[in-house]
Amino acid sequence: MEELLHGMRAYGWGIAKNCFGSEESAALRDACLASRARGDLHRAGVGRGDDMIVREEIRSDSVSWLDEQTPSVDLSRYQILLEKMRKSLNQEFYLGLLDFEGHFAVYPAAGFYKAHLDRPQGTSDRTVAVILYLNEHWQPGDGGELRIWTNRGEKDGPFVMVQPQMGTMVCFLAEHFWHEVLPAHKERMSITGWFRQRSVI
């Protein structure tokens, strides 16, 4: 986790490989697959609440929201890590983070998500985006990278590319950093979510 915190201090974003154990990450991948088998995955939309609509030209993933009230054992282990991370971020950056909301995200082969910010217009609660990748044996050339533009508020200029390999975690300030998911050559899975502040809008 220190690698993520160092990146947040220096840049407002951080990347850490093997941040969550391989066995634990594999268990979460299996939980994601089980969620799909139960029919819990639904096409993701753009916007929030009553304004959410499916826009296939913008994103092509399906999601299943995590149920914090009845977590599985495997999800509980991840939530322990998230809680440690929330407390560390609050202690160091005084962000006032209260909780976490997240979902499994599954992209089909050739799936994508065009460049966007993670704080929908007219909202103020999503503060730090957190992504954990669940893709075993992912190799360079498989595609599906996360591109993060590193100039705050800008959708051009320098960027970093993150391979969605099993156990890799990414975090960044949701309001400031444009990012996109590039098409992959095979199915791509993650847990994507946000630490939230109290909404003031």
Image (tube, grey):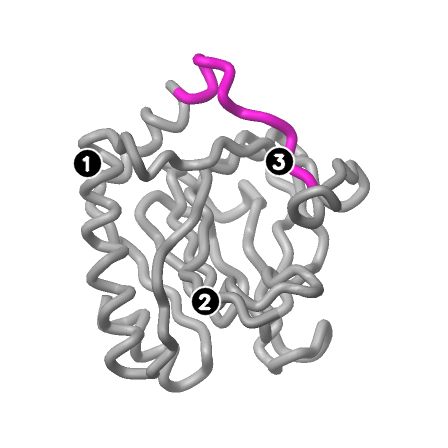
Instruction: Assign a secondary structure to mark 2.
Output: loop
In the image, farthest residue toward the bottom = 10
**Residue that mark 3 sits on:** 61
Magenta stretch in the rendered image: 35-45
Please, is residue 127 above or below residue 131 in the view? Answer: below
Residue 5 found in image quarter: bottom left
For badge 1, the amino acid type reads Glu
* Residue 137 pos. (x, y %): 37, 37
Q: Nearer the viewer, mark 2 or mark 3?
A: 2
Instruction: Assign a secondary structure to mark 3.
Output: loop
Taking depth in this image into account, of 188 and 38 the one nearest to the observer is 38
Residue 160 found in image quarter: bottom right
* Residue 157 pos. (x, y %): 69, 79
Quadrant where the N terminus sits is bottom left
**Residue that mark 2 sits on:** 198
Which label is found at residue 23?
A: 1
| Residue 85 is covered by the magenta coloring | no
Q: Please report the residue visible at 65 percent of the width from the left and 44 percent of the height from the top.
A: 49
For badge 3, the amino acid type reads Asp
For badge 2, the amino acid type reads Arg
* Residue 76 pos. (x, y %): 21, 40
**First of labels 2, 3 by sequence position:** 3
In the image, farthest residue toward the top = 38
Q: Please report the residue visible at 23 percent of the width from the left and 58 percent of the height from the top.
A: 83
Q: Give the side of residue 154 with respect to residue 83, left or right.
A: right
